[in-house]
Image: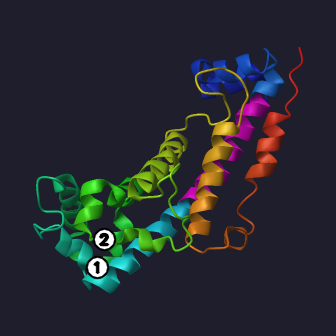
Amino acid sequence: MRYCEFENIISHSRMSRYLDASGGNTRKAMTLYRLNLRLSQELFTVISCFEITLRNAINKHCLDRMGNDWLKKSATNPEIFNNNHCRLTATNINDAITKLSNSYTHNKLVAEMGFGFWRYMFASHQYNAMGKTLLYIFPSKPSSTAAIQYNQKYVFNQLARINDIRNRIAHHEPICFRSGQPIIDTNYSKQQYILTKQFFQWMNIEETTFLYGLDHIDNICDRIDTLIITD
């Protein structure tokens, strides 16, 4: 396909950054765009696997400690989420229950809640309301030091980084550039990829085996980073 046709489909405004990063070389701009799509697909798959793993670990932990239908009950219990500090969490749960209507089951409710919801289980008020025990789902988490406190706040902030790139991908934003600049750079993507693998390791999951056949991120990043720009 000629570049003018490609740009007409994708849009000039979206392709301009790829063209600038490719030194005006239209063929390389199209190649870069396609490689960014491949990187987005691969990374989104890895993050999706982590999201499922995280929510299942939280759910199992809470089932053991709070019993069946713990999530539904937490939205009406004033000592958990039905209070001024956690009201949005309770609202999100109740909205999901309403959406499920007659098809409600506990497992469907768990699946209905998004990555941001599970991340907020480590926000201060939610974490405290849940009994301050959710860090147990990371049995191989490093011990805190004077330099780094591996506490719930640390986990909450690190999960925010993964959530941010997940949302970028979901909104079709590029992840192959240096922040705010039309310069090819996959460091941002690689950092979030490494962080996601780290969380798997903290959960005692051998991520290489778990993601077998799904993970080609390093290879795609290498192809992007070594894309030689010529006139």
Q: Secondary structure at mark 2?
A: helix
Location of residue 58 (image quadrant): bottom left
Quarter occupied by the N terminus: top right
Q: Is residue 36 magenta?
A: yes
Give the answer, above or below, for where 182 lies relative to 215.
above
Report crowding for label 2: few under 14, some 14 to 19, many 20 or more residues within 10 A (C-alpha).
some
Q: Main secondary structure of the magenta part?
A: helix
Residue 189 position within the rendered picture, expressed as x and y whole percent measured from the top left: 65, 42
Residue depicted at x 29% and y 55%: 124
| Quarter occupied by the C terminus | top right
Above or below 152: residue 13: above
Q: Is residue 46 above or below residue 17?
A: below
Q: CA distance from mark 2 to mark 1?
A: 6 Å
Q: Residue at x 43, y 74 (%)?
A: 136
Q: Is residue 91 magenta?
A: no
Q: Position of residue 89 (x, y in %)?
A: 23, 57
Tell me whether circle 2 and circle 1 mark residues in contact (CB < 8 Å).
yes
- Residue 23, position in %: x, y? 79, 16
- Left or right of 206 in this view: 199: left
The magenta-colored residue range is: 30-47
SS type, badge 1 = loop
Please name the residue that numbered disc 2 is placed on.
109
Q: Which residue is mark 1?
A: 105
